[in-house]
Image (cartoon, grey):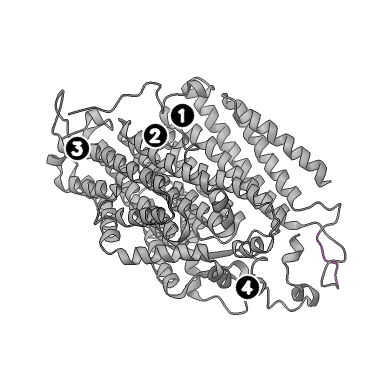
Amino acid sequence: MEFVLSFLVGAYFIGAVYLLLSRHLIRLLLGAALLSNAVNLLIFTAGRLAHEVPPVIPSGLQVPETVTANPLPQALVLTAIVIAFSIFAYLLVLCMRAYQELGTDDTAYMRVAEPVDPPRPPLGY
Amino acid sequence: MAETTIPAETTSSGLDVSAAYVDATVQAADYLVALPVLGPLIMGALCLMLRRNQQLQPGLAGLTLAAVFIGNLVLTHRVMTEGPVFMAMGRWFPPFGITFNADGLGAFLALAASFVGLVCVIYSARSVDSDGRRYGFYPFLLFLVCGVSGAFLTGDIFNLYVWFEVLLISSFGLIILGNSHAQLDGAVKYAFLNLVATTLFLIAVGYTYGVFGTLNMADLAVQVADTPDAPVVTISLLFLFAFAMKAAAFPLNFWLPASYHTPNIVTAALFAGLLTKVGVYALIRIGGMLFPESLITFNEVLVWVAALTTVLGAVGALGSSDIRKLLGFLVLSGIGAMFVGIAVGGPIGLAGAVLYAVHSIVVMAALYLAAGVIGRMNGSFELSEVGGLYRASPFFAALFLILVFALSGLPPFSGFWPKVLLVRGALEAGEGWLTFAYLAASFISMIAIGRVWLFAFWRSDLPSGPAPVVALEQGEQAAYVTPIFLLVVIVVGLGVIANPGLELAGLAAVGILDPIGYVEAVSPVIPQVMP
């Protein structure tokens, strides 16, 4: 099962990197979303997969009877999902505002902060 | 894999939890480890509720950060006398619980960060307008300090990621306050590149968990030493890449000069002081302590990264005409200097890197705040349009000159001692070219920053006529120059009374190179496994 998921994670990373190399904000956004999902899957897979065995100890026992699913990666992934989601929401609004104000979603033409031909420093007094 | 880290006696008997649980009650002094995180977090939330009360917020933020600074002073003193301090959340020992640890490195950097945060609050009392306050400048600032302190003090790699995100989201909020076109443009680049960097970090965290089954730093230090055939190189390369991007080391630096000059000047000062240093800290902590082999494996790469970052930063500063951009390049050059220390390694190199980080936190924040005053008095940040400030304010001119000397590494100011350590460490390691590159870069940055002083203060007339100078009002004088003065006091203090700083940096370096003290402080369970 880990074997299959590894390939899926790899495919996600390929797509994310391809999209993040684009010049257009909307593709960058999709790339960021794909990247965060790739990482979440990666953490989940790294915690080993077990089929339908919740980590619950039966009453009267001190330890679980069988090998159970590892709850820690689930907690980690949950945290990562919340963070990735909030950042994605921020990026979405930021990109929309940038598109409205700067009139382009092509990063090659977004040169307000870094003008193409900035003034040179004075060479003497 | 995860099960192997649980001690057998705990799981078999089930009732004997002494190995997993702190029996003794938590001492009141131990809460100081969590104060730098909890204080700003709670007060930031309070400030968010008091959004409409704009008079109260600066006071609340200032008081919080003053308390955090004093707490950090006590904590640092305790770390120096007693060794690493730790606190287990919920009193569960690692690897079951999450810990907060303060060792020399974390405490020293947290101390410097809280001081800069406090100073920035004083400066912001006048410089942040009511719009900025209404949109949450103070909550963001407090959350930023919370995230930075959390990153310096946490003992768990996943929590380090979480604190990275806390400070990242706060910095997203701060960088966009004001909503100008340049800010939107800068924020897009800043946001995407930093998001990619933290995501790379999370990938590395995921692999670390998959391989070692633990994320606690102390536990991990033991596990890594015990697992010889683990794919350490892959994991540490990912960490290296992520932190180099966070720290803005060449060739991953281009987001910094693109974004740091766009926001409000207090925000820029906070960013320049704190954010990149978190990347350097994480690299020292994870590269130096957890995966010590990685710094040796990639030594050749690090040497090149260090030399190129520091030289290109200095040359970039020389070629900039906007003072804020120029300072952004100087931040880069300083990062290069810290990488020199990391690349050289050993007690001297690491101590140099740590001391340089503290020096850079203070000096870069002070220089940005001073640039704000220059911009306020001259009405421009362009080198060709500033001038005449020496006559208008000799005291401020003297403060700026001290900062110029400190940045150039001249005695008796704070830049001198890290420079001595770095040069000595690099020479002892036989890195002649690296030493040359570093010294050349620091000479070029001296020219670059010295030129700012010459243009803004020394010359009184522009080619087009007398320089336009708007004198500061009475209240502004106090609100703007006092914070810079406070930072300059630290700059002079670190230079003249060098021993505490050197001692603390040495302690930090030794703690990184030999983490047994750190591991023992964290858990009485783990050292038994140590070979």
Dots 2 and 1: beta carbons under 8 Å? Answer: yes
Q: Earlier in the sequence, mark 1 or mark 4?
A: 1
Residue B264 locus on image (x, y percent)? 37, 39
Q: CA distance from mark 1 to mark 4?
A: 51 Å
Mark 2 highlights which residue?
Answer: B262
Residue B28 in sight in this render: yes
Q: Which residues are magenta?
A: A55-60
Q: Can you tell which mark lies on residue B478? A: none
Q: Quadrant of residue B71?
A: bottom left
Label number found at residue B527: 4
**Marked residue chain, label 1:** B
What residue did someone put label 1 on?
Answer: B185
The CA distance from mark 2 to mark 3 is: 24 Å
Measured in 3D between alpha carbons, the distance from the residue under mark 2 to the one under mark 1, in whole angstroms, is 9 Å
Q: Are marks 1 and 4 on the same chain?
A: yes
Q: Secondary structure at mark 1?
A: helix
Percent of width and height locating residue B9 = 76, 76
Mark sitting earlier along the chain (4/3) = 3
User: Which quadrant of the figure contains the N terminus of chain B?
Assistant: bottom right
* Residue B205 position (above or below residue B134): below
Name the residue type under label 3. Answer: Leu
